[in-house]
Amino acid sequence: MPEQSTRTAIVTGSARGIGAAVAERLAADGMAVGVLDLDQDACTAVAERIVAAGGKAVGVACNVADESDVQAAVEKVAAELGAPTVLVNNAGVLRDNLIFKMSANDWDTVMNVHLRGSFLMTRAVQAYMTKEKYGRIVNLSSTSALGNRGQVNYAAAKAGMQGFTKTLAIELGKFGVTANAIAPGFIETDMTKATAERVGMDFEEFKKAAAAGIPVGRGGKPEDIAAAASFFCSEEAGFVSGQVLYVAGGPRD
Ligand code: NAP
C-alpha cells in the first residue's frame, strides 16, 4: 500500500470557507490535493497557497452538479496528481426561505449541488478507489439535518447526505473504502455571513448571538471542521465508517 504522502485527495467547493481549510489541512497531512470549485481563478489561488506552503495541488473549475464537468475534473486531477482515493464532498449553497415562499428553483438548486453533486463526484471517484482497494469519503452534512426554520430544502439535503454516507459505507466497505459525514454547527464563513445579511444582522453581532447558544462558548472555525476531516481521511481511520460526527461545540443529535 502506498504511503499517505502519495495519496491524492479531491475537495469540492474548496476555493473558500470550510473547503479551503480542508484542502490546506489535507495537503499539510501529506496529500496532493485537487481544489475544485466553480471559479478557476479562485481554485488556482488556493492551489498556489498550498504549493507555496510546500504542498502539491491543482485547481480545477468544476460545477459538481454537472455530469460532464465532474468527469473531466476528476480525470484532470487523476492525470496531474495521480488516482484520487480521498474525496471530500463539501460544495454547498443556501437558498433559505419559509416553505410557503420557497420557489421550486430554490429547492432544486440546493438538491442539485449537495445531493446530485455528491452523487456525481462519488460515482466518478469511487472508480479509482475500488481499483486501488482504498478510499476515504467525507460528506458535509449539517446540524440543520435535524430541522431548521427557513431551510426545508437545505435540511432535507443535509439529512440526505447522512443516508448517502451510510449507504456508501455499506456498498464500498469491501473495497477498503470508508465513508463518513461531518455535521458542522455554526461555522464562521461567507455562508454564515450571508445568513446574517439575509436576516439583517451585523455579522459580529450574529456571531456573538450564535456563540451564546453553543456549549463551548464560541463559534466554529473552518479549521475545526478540517481537523475532523483530517481524522476521517487518515489511513488509521479505516475501521470508522458510516458515521455522522456532529462538530458543533456541543451535542446536537
Ligand atoms: P461557503 O463559504 O459558501 O463555500 C462554499 C463553496 O462551495 C463556495 O466556494 C462555492 O462557490 C462552492 N460551490 C457552490 N456551488 C458549487 C457547485 N455547484 N460546484 C462547485 N462548487 C460549488 O460555505 P461553507 O460555509 O464553507 O460551507 C461548506 C460546506 O459546509 C457546505 O456543504 C455547507 O452546507 C456545510 N456547512 C456549513 C456550515 C457553516 O456554518 N458555515 C454549517 C454546516 C454545514 P461560489 O463561491 O462560487 O458560489
Image (spheres, rainbow, N blue to C red):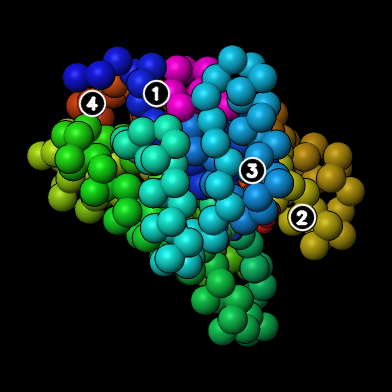
Estimate the x, y position of residue 112 in percent, counting from the top left: 48, 69
Estimate the x, y position of residue 186 in percent, counting from the top left: 63, 42
Query: Farthest residue in the front direction?
Result: 79
Q: Are marks 1 and 2 in contact (CB under 8 Å)?
A: no
- Distance between the alpha carbons at the discs numbered 2 and 3: 21 Å
Residue 55 position (above or below residue 200): above
Residue 175 position (above or below residue 240): below
Q: Are marks 2 and 3 in contact (CB under 8 Å)?
A: no
The residue carrying mark 2 has its beta carbon less than 8 Å from ligand 1: yes
* Dot label at residue 194: 2
Counting residues from the start of the chain, the first of labels 1 and 2 encountered is: 2
- From which residue to which does the magenta span run? 24-32
- Distance between the alpha carbons at the discs numbered 2 and 4: 37 Å
Secondary structure of residue under mark 2: helix
Counting residues from the start of the chain, the first of labels 1 and 3 encountered is: 3
Estimate the x, y position of residue 135 in percent, counting from the top left: 27, 35
Residue, x 45% and y 17% (percent of image)? 30
* Dot label at residue 231: 1
Q: Are marks 2 and 4 in contact (CB under 8 Å)?
A: no
Residue, x 83% and y 57% (percent of image)? 197
Counting residues from the start of the chain, the first of labels 3 and 4 encountered is: 3
